[in-house]
Amino acid sequence: NAGVMQNPRHLVRRRGQEARLRCSPMKGHSHVYWYRQLPEEGLKFMVYLQKENIIDESGMPKERFSAEFPKEGPSILRIQQVVRGDSAAYFCASSPSRIDTQYFGPGTRLTVL
Amino acid sequence: KNEVEQSPQNLTAQEGEFITINCSYSVGISALHWLQQHPGGGIVSLFMLSSGKKKHGRLIATINIQEKHSSLHITASHPRDSAVYICAVRVEGGATNKLIFGTGTLLAVQP
């Protein structure tokens, strides 16, 4: 059973470009979470999705950020018009149910030039 | 004040020593996680606790719900245990399943 997959592992974007981060949860997991780790800071919750539904997006910046988890395919975290402050490691986690352990992916390290 | 506090922030130990990392939280929780992160690396879930004690190899995690406190112990520490250890709590109630994280404890085990 493969673990949580994230791609790309490293992403470089110039200011104003779009960044798309993908997360494939573990097999059988329908709950996906996105977290952000800014340089020298701790992890912060961004959004919690369950197949086709956003359950909690209280940690998402109000503008430029969006997330989806379609019926088929990976979850996508999309950042439009990136700025240098978006440079961070973005981690995805998945779980089979709301109360189970969350398993983390390897992260996508976004660098905005 | 952070809702999840860890201590110490940094810890240096000699190989073989017994290590304790502490976590205190101020919110009602349904579960507490201990995570391990190597520098520049991914995050590994070590334990999820809602009560009592769990053991896996040389790692032991305990939680006291009444005192809102958890500890992670490492017995017979080894240089490969060097990493950041992160405490995270799942807030109780509601539809959300989000985790709130401590700032982490950087552990260095010297040979």
Image: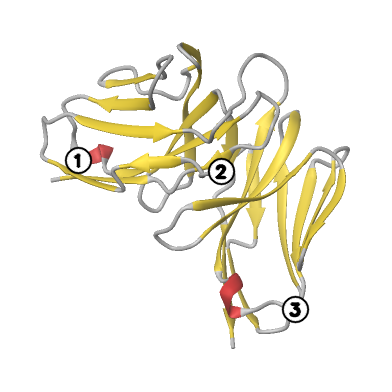
Most distant residue in the front direction: A1
Q: Which residue is mark 1?
A: A84
Q: Amino acid at mark 3?
A: Ala
Position above or below: B18 against A13: below
Q: Nearer the viewer, mark 3 or mark 1?
A: 3
Q: Quadrant of residue B41?
A: bottom left
Query: Badge 3 sits on which subunit?
Result: B
User: Can you tell which mark lies on residue B48?
Assistant: none
Work out whether mark 2 precedes mark 1 in sequence or the reverse, and give the earlier one: 2
Which residue is disc 3 drawn over?
Answer: B76
Q: Residue furthest bottom?
A: B111
Q: Is residue A57 above or below residue A10?
A: above
Tell me, for residue A1, which label it has, or none. Answer: 2
- Vertical side of A83 occupied by B36: above or below: below
Q: Nearer the viewer, mark 2 or mark 1?
A: 2
Residue for point 42% across, 41% down: A5
**What amino acid type should be assigned to the residue bearing mark 2?**
Asn
Q: Residues within 10 Å of mark 1 (few under 14, many from 20)?
A: some
Q: On the rendered image, what quadrant is the N terminus of chain A found in?
A: top right
Helix, strand or loop at mark 3: loop
Whether discs 2 and 3 lie on one chain: the answer is no
Q: CA distance from mark 2 to mark 3?
A: 31 Å
Taking the image as shown, residue B87 lies to the left or right of residue B69, namely left
x and y percent of residue A62 in the render?
Answer: 33, 17
Residue drawn at x 20%, y 24% is: A80
